[in-house]
Image (tube, helix red, strand yellow):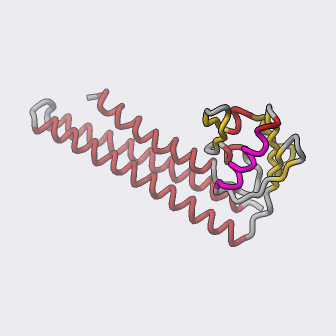
Amino acid sequence: MDEKLLEFENKMKKSCVALEEEYAAIRAGRANPNILNKLTVDYYGVPSTIQQVANVSVPEPRIIQIAPWEKSLIKAIEKAIQISDIGITPSNDGKVIRLVFPELTEERRKDLSKDVKKKAENAKVAVRNIRRDANDAFKKLEKNSEITEDELKTANDKIQKMTDKYVAEIDKLAENKTKEIMTV
């Protein structure tokens, strides 16, 4: 029974980790190299992340600097950034690419905050769906006489506690990201 509970807890944990990754890609007025995590470039026929083919640094709070290890990659990296949805136009001097992040407007901050709340709500729904699946799995075990009614009640209580724990963690992640976005 404990392995089964652990399996469902791991699924809930993965929902929180996925939410953190989504939040890392949301820019909050500060240069954060994580927004480049999902961008790939063709490196000798192999799709590679920008961090695998270049040195990514943040020399100033609102600038990301990308120094490719091979000059031939500058155009490919620039193109990958332009076709992405990060909304920043790269500039290069032949050696490095710079991404300059403009100050976020109040309206844009509010839009990003709404997006953060929406992503948090989706993560909570995912956690609740996992709770439902877990409860169903344990009801099935009880129906097949593999566990007793008392064990079913205990399992349901533990599942509810796990759900509450991860929903609270999601709320905390959303609150922190909103705070980061709204900080001027």
Q: Is residue 89 or residue 5 the one in the foreground?
A: 89
Q: Specify whether residue 155 is painted magenta.
A: no
Residue at the (33%, 50%) spot, across then down: 129
In the displayed structure image, the side of residue 38 where residue 142 appears, left or right: left
Q: Quadrant of the C terminus?
A: bottom right
Q: Is residue 113 above or below residue 48?
A: below
Q: Specify whether residue 80 is painted magenta.
A: yes
Q: Quadrant of the N terminus?
A: top left
Q: Position of residue 8 (x, y in %)?
A: 35, 37
Main SS, magenta region, reads helix
Q: Is residue 165 or residue 39 the one in the foreground?
A: 39
Residue at the (69%, 32%) spot, across then down: 52
Residue at the (71%, 55%) spot, across then down: 82
Q: Quadrant of residue 12?
A: top left
Do we see residue 41 in this rendering? Answer: yes
Q: Please, which residue is most extreme toward the bottom here?
A: 107
Q: Position of residue 35 (x, y in %)?
A: 67, 48
Q: Quadrant of residue 102?
A: bottom right
Figure disc tally: 0
Do we see residue 180 in this rendering? Answer: no
Q: Position of residue 177 (x, y in %)?
A: 63, 54
Q: Which residues are magenta?
A: 73-84
Q: Quadrant of residue 41?
A: top right
